[in-house]
Image (cartoon, grey):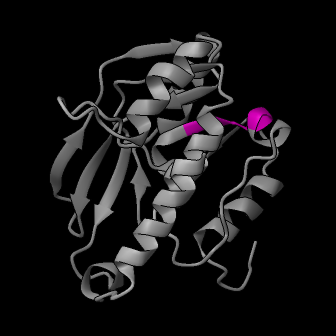
Amino acid sequence: ISIPNGGPGNARNIGMQEAKGKYVYFIDADDTIEQLEIEKIVELAEKNNADTVLGGYKRVDEHNQLRQIIDYEYTVYENKAVLTECLPRIIGSKPEKSDSYKVMVWNTLYSKKIIDCFHIRFNEQKDLKAEDTIFNIDYFAKANKVIISENVGYLYRCNSQSLTSLKFDELLFEKIKYSYRIQEKK
């Protein structure tokens, strides 16, 4: 699909609209996944009758050198526990401990049925910060069974020379506040 640049929310919404499978999995353009990654997480979802699988990831630099591994202990959340135990850890940690799940949309297998049934979409406002979190609040509030996987097959590329790491954004604080207000309402 080729479209004019409408921002990540717009591109992801079009991708979800066109997707034909049972699940949706996002991979950012500069990232990669390990061989058989999709097969592994779909198998985990199918074997456990889960609608969602969230995994860890590896941070690699522009030379594919490993910089950090973000991994999680295998955990299953079902029904109300998704909303009361899992979702709060997606939004952030408790003040007394650092136990949040670092969830972006690119390290999670989503149920296409949930996305379509509840018409869950990305905010398409350009330059919105934390659009992944906003999407995840909507999605995980409807999920029935979430598996936190020990798998770390997603390779997130950290590029020190990317435009987002070099460009000063004087409106960044205002964008973050705006995003926080959306999250707070949800």
Left or right: where 117 falls relative to 175: right
- Residue at the spot x=63%, y=74% of the render? 125
94 to the left or right of 3: left
Q: Is residue 180 left or right of residue 1?
A: left
Q: Is residue 1 above or below residue 28?
A: below
Q: Is residue 112 magenta?
A: yes
- Residue 103, quarter of the rendered image: top left
Reply yes or no: does residue 12 show up in magenta.
no
Q: Position of residue 171 (x, y in %)?
A: 39, 85
Residue at x-position 22% and y-position 35%:
95
Residue 50 position, x and y percent, is: 62, 18
Residue sitting at 79 percent across and 33 percent down? 113
User: Quadrant where the N terminus lies?
Assistant: bottom right
Query: In terms of image quadrants, where is residue 6?
Result: bottom right
Q: Nearer the viewer, residue 78 or 18?
A: 78
Name the quadrant of the C terminus: top right
Which stretch is magenta?
109-114
Q: Is residue 115 above or below residue 181?
A: above
Residue 85 vs residue 3, the one in the foreground: 85
